[in-house]
Structures are given as structure tokens and as C-alpha cells.
Image (cartoon, rainbow, N blue to C red):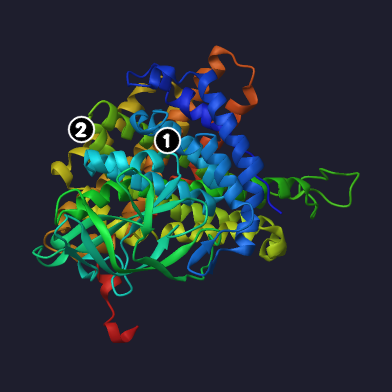
Amino acid sequence: MTTYTAPVRDLQFVLHDLLDISTLDLPGYGDLDREFTEAVLDAAGKLASEVLAPLNGVGDRQGCRLENGVVRTPDGFKAAFDQMRDGGWTALDCDPEYGGQGMPYVMGLSAGEMFSGSNMAFAMYPGLTHGAYSAIHAHGTDAQKATYLPRMVSCEWTGTMNLTEPHAGTDLGLLRTKAEPQDDGSYLITGQKIFISAGDHDMADNVIHLVLAKAPGGGEGTRGISLFIVPKFLVNDDGSLGERNAVSVGNLEEKMGIHGNATCVMNYDGARGWLLGELHKGMRAMFTMMNEARIGVGLQGYAVAEAAYQNAVAYARDRLQGRAVTGDANPAGPADPLIVHPDIRRNLMDQKSFVEGARALATWCAHLIDRSHLAQDADAEALVSLLTPVVKGFLTDKGFETAVQAQQVFGGHGYIEEQGMSQFTRDARIAMIYEGANGVQALDLVGRKLAAEGGKPIMAFFEMIKAEIKAHDTDEDLKTSFCDPLKTASKDLQTAAMFFMEQGMKNPNAALSGSYDFMHLFGHVALGLMWTRMAAAAGKALAEGTGDRSFYEAKIATGRYYMARQLPMTGAHLARIRSGAEPVMALDAGQF
């Protein structure tokens, strides 16, 4: 059985030593001093470790079941959901006008990491609801907001996003779900959606589906798509629940992982829905939800990796196997613990340096989202838009890889279900696929985000790196161990970006063949920037005097490892990018 300890200490380091959030001039940030955030994160961490984590294995073993048209969640899920709801955790960063607590998004993300790390399948229910809340909050009418948001903030009602159809995955222009306008202003929605996470369950009174469908007169492709609010139960004028809508669960998918979350086939048989946002502009409204979801999925990648890493460290400390090559570390015992062996140390350092770097990157992006929303900072919005496919794609790829590495520490026992390590790898795997498969994220990064605003966001990122390097040019240790490797990696990223600019128009296959490598190259540089900043923050704390020297010294040592052992991968990715399209496209389709 696996365990989970909430990483409150490291979250506090990121929020205060790295970002220094309480000093930033943004609404709500002035309240986020160390004492306040520690109290919030301690309480969230207690819920995660004591309530949600013990249900993680239960959800994996039992899964969800469909009984008489209603989805039943695993034992203990409903009581835990009530506890989360009663504690106000679903409302943490929601609008106070609708019952939210009004904290900045950076706090919602920090608490969300612990919920996902302790029980990813469970955390998806409130997580998807938050995404639907955001879409309605951004695009809904005043009446729609008043009707739906208070109960979605409290999670009395939960939410979903309905995009995918059996014949149309990423290519939404192929969808067939129809929306027929009615005289009263509503629409009748008819069609089938698949892979709908949290599509139905027994933990809330209503489920509010956001459904993409085509209304008459919209034209072909994505231009004809609109977004509709389709509740499981119709809502009366007084806010009470009315009759059951014509939407039902056709089947529950049998999946590799996240068994505790209901992944549903949803049938819409003339279900009544209401337009959200503008007619035929549903993609714009849906992407409000999708972009938030993609940051959230990136979070899932490193949150599950954190949980897997914790269990791998505990096992490596306890499991006796072999003797250290430099002499017995445990002379009184029959063997030394695994953690003395260099290859185990390499494995664990790979895990630790990724998880801590990823946490810093995602939290910084959450701060950029706060800047864009709370201060209407267009530059912050452009930067986080550029980084979103990197956060989603790179952090989930590496998160899965990290879960596999943690499983490897257990040897054969990691392959045995009793140990629980396989659940981390199975759960983490979906994050590379849903909310836009990672190959699509790479195409979005190279095909759209790189050239956005004439390249202004990527140039701003490069200038940020230059400024960081210059800020430490008199600190010889930081310069040698962090700034010099970061400078080299940044040059690799710039060279790759230039290659795409030169090749993109005349040979688009050359750019697209290297897009996945570019996403990983970018991800490594972004984590290199985070590690440089974290090392500087840790060095400052040590210089000023601290009672927690071991923590800060370990932070710097972990950063040095990343810069020396992981960041050089940018050179390999650049070499692959520069090879162009020819090696990738050399075979005819029939030769595969």
C-alpha cells in the first residue's frame, strides 16, 4: 500500500522564497503571507494525506459501476467529496459573488497539486467542475451565472466538458452532434460524446455538461461549432431541480488507469440545452476551459510523480540489497539499503530534480494567470499562452517517465499490484493523452504559439533568461553551476526557433517533424530557468541565516544535478530538430 505526505514545505519555498508572492502588487496577494499560506496548505495537505490518499487504491481496485442509469463511485468517495465540499476546498479561488473564497489562482493550484497527488481520479471531479465554472463565468449571461455558478462553486452540482465523438478525436471540425433551435430560445441537442471524464456520478445533485454541437447556419469545420449548457436535471426558475433531461450514460469505459473517475459515453437524445457565449463561436468559449484544463493536466503529471517518488525514496531507504562498493554502510545487517547505490541515487535524483522544477514552473505559470486576470497584464497572458503547451506536454511526458522510474526502484515488487506502484504509472499515462494529446501540444507550440504576436512572447522569454543570467554575473558559484548551462541551453532553444522560422514556410514538414523535440527542449530550458532562480533564492536564505540549512543546501544540490545531468539534453533535441523532415518522412506509407 502506498502513502502520501503533502509537500507543504516545498510549496512554501516556491510561493515565498522563489516567487515572494506576499510582496507582489496584485489584488489578494497582500494577504498571502507565510503564516496564512501555511495554514491553508497544511489543512489541504491533511485532507489529501488522511482522507484522499487512503482512497486512492480503493478507487483503483473497485472502479465505478453503472447501475440503472446511474454511475456509482467507489466506497468512500462520496463521504470524502462531502468533506471536501464542506471544507470549502472547491471554492478556494472562485468568485466571492457566487460563494467563492476569492483567493488567487496560485493558491488553488497549490492545493490542487496535493489533491491530485494523493488521489488523481478523485480530484478530477472538482477539477473539471472548476473548468466548467470558469467557462460559464467568462462567457455566460448574468442569468446563467446566477443559475449555475453558486452550486458549481460549492460542488452541489459538478461540471464536465463534452468534446470528443467516436469518429472525431482532436479534429473537432468533424463532430456531428446537432443543436436545433427552439422557439423559447433553447436548443435540442442530439448526438453522442465519448471519453467524458466525470460524466456522471452519485456525489452531486446535478451534472452540468458543456457540450460542443453544430447549430444551423454555422458553416463547415470548427466555424460552425457552438457551446451549450446541458444539465442532467433541468433547473426550474426558482433554482430547484426539475425533470430529468434527455441525456444518459450509454457506457463506462474500461481503462488503463484513473479507475475511480467515471469516463462515460454520453448520449444526447434531444436534450434541452442553452447557448453559452456567441452562436458559432463555441471554440472560443471552450478554450477558456481547455487552457485551464491543460495547466491542470500538467499539474497531474508532476503531482502523481511526486507521490511515486515519495514511495520510491521510502523503499530505497528500507530495502536491503547488496553492499556499497565503497564499504559496508550497514555492517550490522545482511546488506546495505538500496539508497547507497549510485544508480539508485541517479534514479532518485532524476525524479526529485524533475518534480521540484516542475512544481516551480507550474506555480509560476499560475502566478502569470493571476497577473493576466487580476491586473489585465497582456504580456503575462501572452507568456502563459506560450508556456501552456510546454506545461501540458513536457510535464506529463516527464511525469509518466518519473512514475516509471519510481516503479523501477522497487524492482520486481514494483510490478506487483500489491505494492501500488503500478497505479501511479497507469494513472499518469492518461495525462499525456487527454486535453489534447502531447503531439498536438507540440504542433500548437510550433505552429501557432511560436509565431504569436510576431514572436513577441518567445522573445520576451529569451530576454527574461538573459536578465536572470546577468543578475548573477558576480556570483561565481551560480554563474558556473547554473547560469552558464542555462545560457548554453537557451542558445539551443533560440537556434531551434530560428530553424523553424527559416524552414516553416518553404518546408513545413521540417518544422513539424521537430515539434515534439522542440517542446521538450523548451521544457528543459524552462526548468533550467526555474532551477537557476531557486538556487539563487536558496543561496539568499543560507546567507541570511536559517534554521533549515539542510533543506536549502539540498535544494541547491538538486538544482546542480538538473543543470549537469538533465539540461544538456537540449543539445540532443536540437540535433534531432536540425535533421529536418527527411529521416522522418523517408518511408512510403506502405513501407511501415
Q: Amino acid at mark 2?
A: Ala
Q: Residue at x 33, y 73 (%)?
A: 166
Q: Is residue 34 above or below residue 304?
A: above
x and y percent of residue 213 in the render? 23, 63
Amino acid marked by disc 1:
Thr
Residue 496 appears anywhere in the view = no
Q: Of callouts 1 and 2, which one flags the residue occurring earlier in the amino acid sequence? A: 1
Give the residue drawn at x 55%, y 30%: 41
The CA distance from mark 1 to mark 2 is 19 Å
Q: Is residue 302 visible?
A: yes
The label on residue 157 is none
- Which numbered dot is residue 363? 1
Question: Dot 1: what SS?
Answer: helix
- Indicate the quadrant where residue 257 lies: bottom right
Residue ID at (52%, 52%): 203
Are the residues at dot 1 and dot 2 in contact (C-beta closer than 8 Å)?
no
Q: Which residue is mark 2?
A: 378
Q: Is residue 534 above or below residue 277?
A: above
Which corner quadrant holds the C terminus? bottom left
How far across and how far down the image is residue 235, in percent?
34, 50
